[in-house]
Amino acid sequence: MAIPRFPFLRDAWALARPYWSSEERWRARLLLAVVVALNLALVGMGVLLTFWNRQFYNVLEARDAEAFGALLLLGHRGAGGFMPGFAVIAPLYILVAVYALYLQMALQIRWRRWMTEKLIEGWLEHRAYYRIALTDRGTDNPDQRIAEDTRLFVDDTLSLGLGLMNAVVTLVSFVFVLWSLSGPMEILGVSIPGYMVWVALLYSVIGTWLAHLVGRRLIRLNFLQQRVEADLRFALVRFRENMEGIALQGGEARERQGLLAHFHAVLENWWGIMRVTKHLTFFTAGFTQVAIVFPILVAAPAFFAGRLDLGGLIQTSSAFQEVQGSLSWAINNYGQLTGWRATVERLTGFSRAIALAHAAAGEGPRRVATPGPGPELRAEQLDIHLPDGRSLTRQARLLVRPGEAVLITGASGSGKSTVFRALSGIWPFGSGEIATPPGEALFLPQRPYLPLGTLRAAVTYPRDPAEVPEARLRAVLEQVGLGRLLPRLDEAETWDKRLSGGEQQRLAIARALLLRPRWLFLDEATASLDPEAEEALYALLRRELPETGILSIAHRPAVARHHDRVLRLEEGVLRPV
């Protein structure tokens, strides 16, 4: 299926197509087919109800009590044939309507699950999330795009798509009914057949054009609303994550100012949406109200002339409203359409940012796996720079042998931590070659990452806690001075908020002792500890991990005694001290 002209629709199709051609395509298509069939059945029953209404009002006009009761119960055979009763049509209509909605919701959640999983996989693959955060300032709040925009896209795509289909089928179905009921009309000596159809078409086209003129600003406003709402949520999360630092520095006034600035952006944009929505609602509400009496006014001359009975008048009015409602689908869904378009634009931007990050995955210093039982970690001609192009190292060289401990020092901002990022393979800006020997590598930053969940899961991260023997886990926690936490191993907490900075760094050292990596990188990983505890933990690492190559960044001179060599990063070059 090709959508050749409209870029917005091409973007929407590009987002939707992968699911419908995925491994779930047959189940998804079958479910969609059932939902479509049920919606078509609802349209068919809607047509049937107009004929039921015609007979019902005609028997009322004739004061036929017997036929009246039959039409309410099982059915009545009249001049036009057998008509099922309301007691038959209504329960069937309700059953079909309920399962049409239920199965549509089932399709929504299946599609959303698949799309969310794929976006998360793409965001994490090749560490795209890291590169996007460094380079793509236009892709704000990826959490909101994955969680909220995905839900909105799936829900709106299905509801709008099925709504449009229903509108088209309803239009085709009721055009024939309206055409047969309205007959010709003479205007300036010209006979116009099915004049009510042409009146409904003209009425709806004019209404759609006017609605677009009134409401087109909603497209941009809805896009901005999603953005400013996400910015506010992000600012609140940042506040929650840094409450202690804010409290210690008395930053409440500044934080209040920043949070209220984000909220005022939400309010200002919302007022814009309100103003446009008010004008659009004035028009659509008036348009809808006029549509109630407009068909009766147009058909009234035929009724008063005796060419149309009461049931025919009611059926004509109903058919006109269905035709007009189908033609006015865009008017009735204009607000949802503008919100859907904003969602498509945000998801498309996010998907493109992920694709660009994947395409650039090979950039940066080249990593080469070196074979052999015990080769060294080596970096040659390492040129590292920042995203803005500023150089941090120039033709730097580094060598770390198995079991050797090397300390890197240097002024703050000289690029020591960025060298670690390059060695880990996550820094995409630079050139050179990094020979990575076999064996697991573990990087411990100054602020260790503690995942949500139990303390046991935090200590053993990123491994499965079930893989670590209980006795070994308890012994290591005792070794690093966290024995008091042993009774809380299976408590689920936000441990990065419950533990002090020093305790978090002790936990990270325990993680290194448990995992026993071949290569260990420590970036100020003990800076929150007192000098005595820092020296004790370094001595523990050297004693417990004698075959592990250790590369450290630290500023305290006393740490140097636990290393075999010291290098200083100065003017982009690593020099021996």
Image (spheres, grey):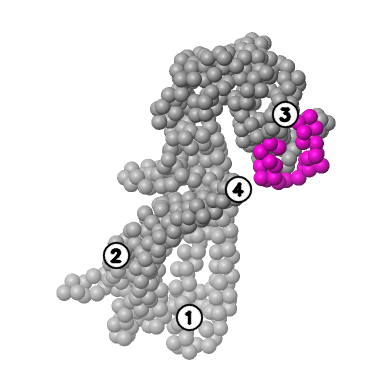
Q: Position of residue 50 (x, y in %)?
A: 44, 73
Q: Quadrant of the N terminus?
A: top left
Name which of mark 3 and mark 4 comes first in the sequence.
4
Q: Where in the figure is residue 336, as x and y percent of width and height?
A: 43, 59
Which residue occupies 31% across, 80% down? 297
Q: Name the disc covering residue 248, or none.
A: 4
Residue 511 image point, x, y percent:
71, 30
Q: Residues within 10 Å of mark 2 (few under 14, many from 20)?
A: some
Amino acid type, callout 4: Leu
Q: Dividing the picture into quarters, in which one does residue 324 lie? A: bottom left
Left or right: residue 328 compared with residue 505: left
Q: Which residue is mark 1?
A: 56
Q: Earlier in the sequence, mark 4 or mark 1?
A: 1
Find disc 2 in the rendering and name its residue: 210
Disc 1 from disc 2: Cα separation: 37 Å
Q: Please state the extent of the stretch shown in magenta in the rendering.
A: 478-503
Q: Is residue 497 magenta?
A: yes
Q: CA gap, disc 4 to disc 2?
A: 57 Å
The type of residue carrying mark 2 is Leu
Q: Nearer the viewer, residue 190 or 164?
A: 164
Q: Residue at x 77, y 36 (%)?
A: 482
Alpha carbons under labels 3 and 4: distance apart: 26 Å
Of badges 3 and 1, the one in the foreground is: 3
Number of the label disc, if any, that sits on residue 532: 3
Chain-order first, disc 2 or disc 3: 2
Residue that extends furthest to the right in the rendered view of this protein:
471
Is residue 51 something that shows in the picture?
yes
Q: Is residue 156 visible?
A: no
How far is the residue under mark 2 from the one under mark 3?
A: 77 Å
- Asked where in the image residue 300 lies, by quadrant, the reply is bottom left
